Image: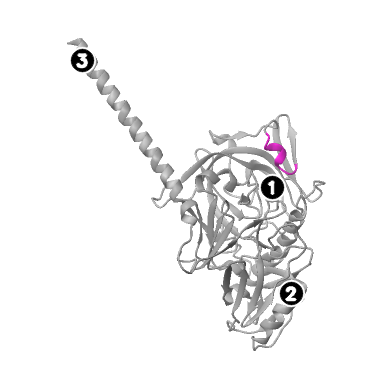
C-alpha cells in the first residue's frame, strides 16, 4: 500500500512538474512571439502639456524661440561629431521628443529624450548633485538587477570620455573635454557606466517587455547649461552601446515613429519590431546610409526638391558617404546649404502672395499673416522615394503676425538636416539590416 501511494505521489509530482514546465515554456514562447510581433511606446514633445518639463509660465512663442535656438545648436553639435572619427560621444540633452521607460527591478519609470543621433543612453541616478528638478530619479541600490560596468569590460573604452575609478568604468562630458568629438554645450555630467533591466512599451496584448543587461550611463553629477532640458537620453543610433543595438536581435533592427505637431496635446508613437513595418501602396522607400561615424547619425540621399512644378537638383557636399542629408528627430527645422536654400526660397517666394518680413535669426524668410497661409506644394525627392510635404511641415508661426519658412542655411562643409518638423504626421520606418527608410503620410494623433 505504501509503495502504491509512493508511486502515485511520484507520478503526481512528475505530472505537476511537467505541467509547470510546459506552462513556463508556453509563456516563454508567448513573450518571444510578442517581441517578434513588436511593441510600441508613446512619444510626446518636450514642450507639450503632456511633458513633465512643460513650463506653464512661458509663453507659446517664448517656448518656440528656445526650441529654434536649440535646433541650430543641435545641428552644429552633431556635425561636429559626424566630421570626426571619435569614440562614442556622450552628447548633450538637446532634443525634442520624450518617451517613458522603466529601469531596474522593480522598474522605476523615467522620462527620457529620444535621440537617433546618439549611441549612449543615460539617466540621472540617486544620489545626484544638481538633479533637484528631475523626478523621478533612478536609485541603483533599490534595483536587484543593477551592476556597474567594470573597467575590464571591452565596452568601457568605447564610451567617449571614460576613465576608471577603482574598477568602475566612469564617464564625463563637459565643455572643456579634450576628447575628439566630445560635444560641448557648457553643461557637465559625470557618472558610472552601468547595466540593468529596461522595461519598454506594450505589445498588442498590452504586455510590457523587459530587456536585461542594458548598458547605460548612470550620472550622479549634473551642472546644466541654459540650453538643456535635463532629462535622460534614449540612444537609437547604431553603435554597439545604443539601446537599439542592444535589443536588435529581439526587434530585427526595425523601429518607426510618428511625430505629432510640436505643441500638440496628443501623443505620437514609436514602434519596434513587427509593429514598425509599413505596408500599402502609399509607402515610399529610400536607401539608408550610415555616417562616417556609424554610431552617430542616419543619412539619406536627397536628389532634388520640387516647389510646385520647379525641380531643383540638389548638389552633394564633399563626403566619403553616399548619403548627403541627416534624418534626425532632435532638430526642429531642416537645414540646407546656403546657396541651395536661396534657390529654394526664391521659388517658394514666387508662390506665396504675402508681404515679406525677414528675420535676423533663423528662420529668415517670413511673411506677414494672421492666419494659416496657403503653402506651396513641396516634394523631397530621395533616391526611390518622393515625400510630399504640407504646410505644417514647411512653415511655422513665430508670433501672432508672422509665419516663416521652416528651413535654415548651413555651411557647405556641414551635413544638411531633415528636421522633425518636416517629418510630423508621417510614419517613418527604419530597417537597419535592410538599410532602408520608409515614409507614409499619417495623422499621428490617431495612429
Q: Kindly report the secondary structure that dominates the magenta region of the rendered protein.
A: loop
**CB of mark 1 within 8 Å of CB of mark 3?**
no
**Colouring used for the render:** one colour
Q: Which residue is mark 3?
A: 5
Near mark 3 (Cα within 10 A), the count class, few <14, some 14-19 or many ≥20, is few
Q: Position of residue 181 (x, y in %)?
A: 77, 50
**Residue drawn at the location 66% of the way across and 51% of the way down:** 118
Give the answer, above or below, for where 384 lies relative to 391: above
Q: Does residue 185 appear in the picture of this structure? A: no
Q: Is the residue under label 2 in contact with that under label 1 (CB below 8 Å)?
A: no
* Marks 1, 3: nearer the viewer: 3
Q: Which mark is residue 340?
A: 2
As drawn, the residue found furthest toward the left would be 1
Who is closer to the viewer here, 209 or 309? 309
Q: Kindly identify the residue that appears in the image at 69 percent across and 56 percent down.
A: 228
Q: Is residue 155 magenta?
A: yes
Q: CA distance from mark 1 to mark 3?
A: 67 Å
Q: Nearer the viewer, mark 3 or mark 2?
A: 2
User: From which residue to which does the magenta span run?
Assistant: 154-161
Amino acid at each position: 500500500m505504501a509503495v502504491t501511494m509512493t508511486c502515485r505521489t511520484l507520478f503526481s509530482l512528475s505530472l505537476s512538474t511537467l505541467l509547470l514546465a510546459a506552462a513556463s515554456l508556453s509563456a516563454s514562447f508567448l513573450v518571444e512571439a510578442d517581441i517578434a510581433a513588436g511593441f510600441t511606446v508613446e512619444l510626446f514633445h518636450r514642450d507639450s502639456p503632456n511633458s513633465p518639463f512643460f513650463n506653464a509660465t512661458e509663453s507659446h512663442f517664448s517656448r518656440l524661440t528656445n526650441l529654434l535656438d536649440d535646433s541650430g545648436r543641435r545641428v552644429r553639435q552633431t556635425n561636429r561629431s559626424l566630421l570626426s572619427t571619435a569614440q562614442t560621444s556622450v552628447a548633450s540633452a538637446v532634443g525634442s521628443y520624450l518617451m517613458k521607460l522603466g529601469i531596474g527591478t522593480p522598474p522605476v519609470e523615467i522620462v527620457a529624450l529620444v535621440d537617433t543621433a546618439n549611441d549612449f543612453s543615460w539617466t540621472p541616478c540617486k544620489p545626484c548633485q544638481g538633479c533637484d528638478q528631475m523626478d523621478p530619479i533612478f536609485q541603483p541600490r533599490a534595483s536587484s538587477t543593477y551592476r556597474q560596468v567594470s573597467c575590464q569590460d571591452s565596452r568601457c573604452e568605447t564610451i567617449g570620455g571614460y576613465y576608471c575609478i577603482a574598477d568602475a568604468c566612469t564617464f564625463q562630458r563637459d565643455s572643456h573635454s579634450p576628447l575628439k568629438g566630445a560635444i560641448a554645450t557648457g553643461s557637465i555630467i559625470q557618472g558610472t557606466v552601468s547595466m540593468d533591466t529596461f522595461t519598454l512599451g506594450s505589445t498588442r496584448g498590452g504586455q510590457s517587455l523587459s530587456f536585461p543587461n542594458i548598458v547605460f550611463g548612470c550620472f550622479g553629477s549634473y551642472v546644466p547649461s541654459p540650453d538643456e532640458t535635463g532629462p535622460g537620453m534614449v540612444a537609437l543610433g547604431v553603435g554597439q552601446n545604443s539601446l537599439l543595438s542592444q535589443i536588435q536581435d529581439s526587434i530585427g533592427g526595425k523601429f518607426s515613429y510618428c511625430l505629432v505637431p510640436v505643441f500638440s496635446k496628443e501623443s505620437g508613437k514609436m514602434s519596434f519590431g513587427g509593429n514598425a513595418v509599413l505596408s500599402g501602396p502609399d509607402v515610399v522607400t529610400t536607401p539608408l546610409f550610415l555616417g562616417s561615424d556609424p554610431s552617430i547619425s542616419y543619412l539619406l540621399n536627397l536628389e532634388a526638391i520640387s516647389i510646385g512644378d520647379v525641380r531643383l537638383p540638389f548638389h552633394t557636399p564633399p563626403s566619403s558617404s553616399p548619403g548627403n542629408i541627416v534624418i534626425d528627430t532632435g532638430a526642429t527645422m531642416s537645414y540646407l546649404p546656403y546657396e541651395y536654400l536661396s534657390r529654394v526660397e526664391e521659388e517658394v517666394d514666387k508662390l506665396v502672395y504675402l508681404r515679406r518680413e525677414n528675420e535676423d535669426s533663423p528662420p529668415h524668410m517670413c511673411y506677414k499673416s494672421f492666419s494659416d497661409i496657403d503653402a506651396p506644394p513641396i516634394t523631397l525627392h530621395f533616391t526611390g522615394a518622393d515625400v510630399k510635404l504640407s504646410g505644417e511641415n514647411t512653415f511655422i508661426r513665430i508670433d501672432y503676425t508672422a509665419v516663416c519658412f521652416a528651413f535654415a542655411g548651413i555651411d557647405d562643409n556641414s551635413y544638411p538636416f531633415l528636421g522633425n518638423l518636416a517629418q510630423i504626421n508621417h510614419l517613418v520606418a527604419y530597417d537597419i539590416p535592410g538599410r532602408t527608410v520608409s515614409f507614409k503620410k499619417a495623422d499621428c494623433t490617431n495612429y
